Amino acid sequence: MQEMPLFPLQRVLFPTVALPMQIFEQRYLNLVKASLSGDQAFAVVPILEGREVGATPQIHHWGTAVRICDWSQLPNGLLGIVVRGVQRVRIERSWAQDDGLASADVVLQPADHERPMNECDADLGELLKSFATQMGLSQWYIDEGLTDVSLAWRLADLLPVDRAAKLDLLAEDDPAIRLSRVRAWVLALSQR
């Protein structure tokens, strides 16, 4: 278990998935500065109740530890960062610091044993490529190192499925079950 700062968001962020963000609240500017200067991870956690701005919201008990992989000043003058999910975390206890930044005692979940994507999942790989290309997100979702684990996480991120299903997927420990659930989502969506 370790203490980790939290960045609550209205969305579910999965490991291996990249997310561009605009930073404007002082507490998050401080978090980004500390993260960049110390190469320190923080966790993105889904909000269950409340908002991203203002008071500390109620959060889910699962999140994703992230690393900042890029940053820049945006045309609107705000700080832009890109984070990439590294590994799942389970939130044991959370609290708000004096500046409103949420922190938690987290348990880092073991890294998944990743295997190269196999032929029977090639259809899902093609679907991921198609979605990412149509959405102009190829640089964040497609790479030469696509594995069974990253395929499930990245496709789950792009699929228009219920948020509760995505929260359940984040809590699932077994990579084979995660990929099976994502395949079931694709099948259900294709029958609409």
Image: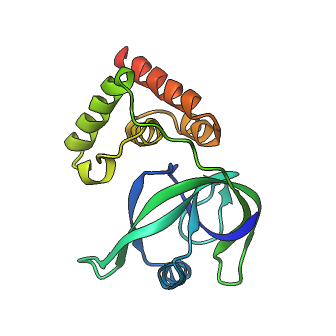
| Figure check: 83 above or below 149 | below
Q: In the rendered image, is residue 47 in sight?
A: no
Q: Quadrant of residue 75?
A: bottom left
State the image coordinates of residue 161 (x, y, percent, origin top left).
Answer: 46, 33
State the image coordinates of residue 88 (x, y, percent, origin top left).
Answer: 60, 52
| Figure check: 61 above or below 167 | below
Q: Is residue 108 left or right of residue 21?
A: right
Q: In the rendered image, is residue 154 in sight?
A: yes
| Figure check: 111 above or below 134 | below
Figure quadrant of the C terminus: top left
Figure quadrant of the N terminus: bottom right
Is the image coloured rainbow, by chain, by secondary structure, or in one colour? Answer: rainbow
Q: Residue at x 29, y 82 (%)?
A: 77
Q: Which residue is nearer to you in this view: 73 or 14?
A: 14
Q: Residue at x 51, y 63 (%)?
A: 66
Q: Which residue in the rendered view is the most extreme toward the top? A: 191
State the image coordinates of residue 37 (x, y, percent, origin top left).
Answer: 49, 85
